[in-house]
């Protein structure tokens, strides 16, 4: 349902008992939306949690953007949504680019977040996009990694995503484990083009926001909550350096290596993923 939050309406998919432990899902992309995750995990996690999936402002079923957007806007939306729903505290479960937002949110609002889960996060955009391109290069003999130094930029993002786009129909080969190559993401075929266009516009706006260039890895040391990093064996996003820093700098961090899975552990190994999340949060 559409829920008024701050100056927009967010699409919020709530499942499970309202008196169950609340769990917020933060999607990646940028602009991926919550539709796919809720298709694979919504009913599973709703057995034990009050699961709250939200399309970030301007994304998929939420109202389209009517101006610029920043990561600070998204974090403020999460906190305003928590207050609107009457949730005192919640755990946060994030995927891919959503891990960057979840890290910023937990560091900025430690009293609101009890536990935090990162599934194949893209915390540092230069590191994550370099890792993605390097995963694609074996399939693109004529391609090269676009060079970049310093903080993330819109140009860096566009150049590196353009390399990934050269994969065309083979794009999912770098994202999925070998046993999941026939996996289909339902949003690709079940949502209308209008929603995908909204997500594309959101991605263009957030990646040119100054907030996109801001480093976030320093927030590891500020996490007061127990944190779980789920890393798929074949995931191309989370870089070795990010994993190293998580394991060394997060005071209450746990690392889980999902053998055989790629970027979408929640879809490739749905039952084991749901058990892992449930055990950690409970």
Image (spheres, rainbow, N blue to C red):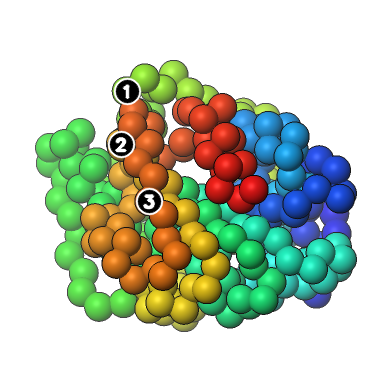
Residue pointed to by mark 1 = 178
Local crowd size for mark 1, using a 10 Å CA cut-off: few (<14), some (14–19), many (≥20): few
Element type at marker 1?
A: helix
| Residue 255, numbered circle | 3
The answer to whether any part of residue 65 appears in the image is no
Q: How far apart in space, not on screen, are marks 1 and 2 (Cα)?
A: 8 Å
Q: CA distance from mark 2 to mark 3?
A: 16 Å
Camera-side mark, 3 or 1: 3
Point out the tag, 1 or 2, that comes first from the N-terminus: 1
Name which of mark 2 and mark 3 comes first in the sequence. 2
In the rendered image, which residue does mark 2 sit on? 234
Q: Nearer the viewer, residue 230 or 281?
A: 281
Question: Residue 10 is drawn in which quadrant?
Answer: bottom right
* Coordinates of residue 214 in the picture (x, y in percent): 41, 79
Classify 10 Å Cα crowding around label 3: few (below 14), some (14-19), many (20 and above): some
Question: Which residue is at 58% across, 79% downward?
Answer: 108
Residue 74's place in the image compared with 129, above or below, is below
Identify the mark at residue 79; answer none if there is no mark: none
- Tell which of 141 and 282 is nearer to you: 282
Question: Sequence-wise, which precedes: disc 3 or disc 1?
Answer: 1
x 74%, y 44%: residue: 49
What is the C-alpha distance between the residues marked 3 and 1?
22 Å
State left or right for residue 225 relative to residue 237: right
Looking at the picture, how far across and down is residue 126, in whole percent?
29, 66
Q: Is residue 61 above or below residue 217?
A: above
């Amino acid at each position: 349902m559409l829920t008024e939050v701050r100056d927009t309406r967010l699409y919020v998919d709530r499942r499970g008992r309202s008196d169950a432990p609340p769990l917020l899902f933060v999607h990646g992309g940028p602009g991926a939306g919550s539709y796919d995750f809720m298709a694979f995990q919504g009913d599973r996690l709703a057995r034990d949690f009050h699961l709250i999936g939200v399309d970030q402002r301007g994304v998929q079923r939420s109202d389209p953007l009517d101006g610029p957007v920043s990561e600070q806007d998204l974090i403020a939306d999460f906190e305003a949504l928590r207050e609107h729903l009457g949730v005192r505290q919640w755990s946060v479960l994030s995927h891919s680019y959503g891990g960057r937002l979840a890290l910023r949110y937990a560091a900025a609002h430690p009293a609101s977040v009890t536990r935090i889960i990162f599934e194949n996060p893209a915390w540092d955009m230069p590191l994550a996009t370099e890792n993605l391109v390097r995963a694609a290069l074996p399939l693109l003999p004529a391609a090269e990694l676009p060079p970049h130094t310093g903080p993330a930029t819109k140009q860096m993002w566009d150049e590196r995503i353009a390399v990934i786009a050269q994969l065309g129909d083979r794009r999912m080969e770098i994202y999925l484990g070998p046993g999941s190559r026939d996996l289909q993401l339902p949003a690709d075929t079940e949502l209308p083009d209008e929603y995908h266009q909204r997500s594309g516009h959101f991605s263009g706006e957030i990646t040119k926001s100054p907030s996109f260039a801001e480093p976030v890895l320093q927030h590891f040391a500020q996490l007061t909550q127990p944190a779980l990093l789920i890393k798929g064996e074949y995931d191309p996003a989370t870089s070795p350096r990010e994993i190293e820093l998580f394991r060394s700098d997060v005071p209450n961090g746990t690392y889980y290596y999902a053998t055989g899975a790629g970027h979408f552990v929640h879809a490739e190994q749905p039952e084991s993923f749901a058990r892992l999340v449930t055990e950690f949060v409970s």
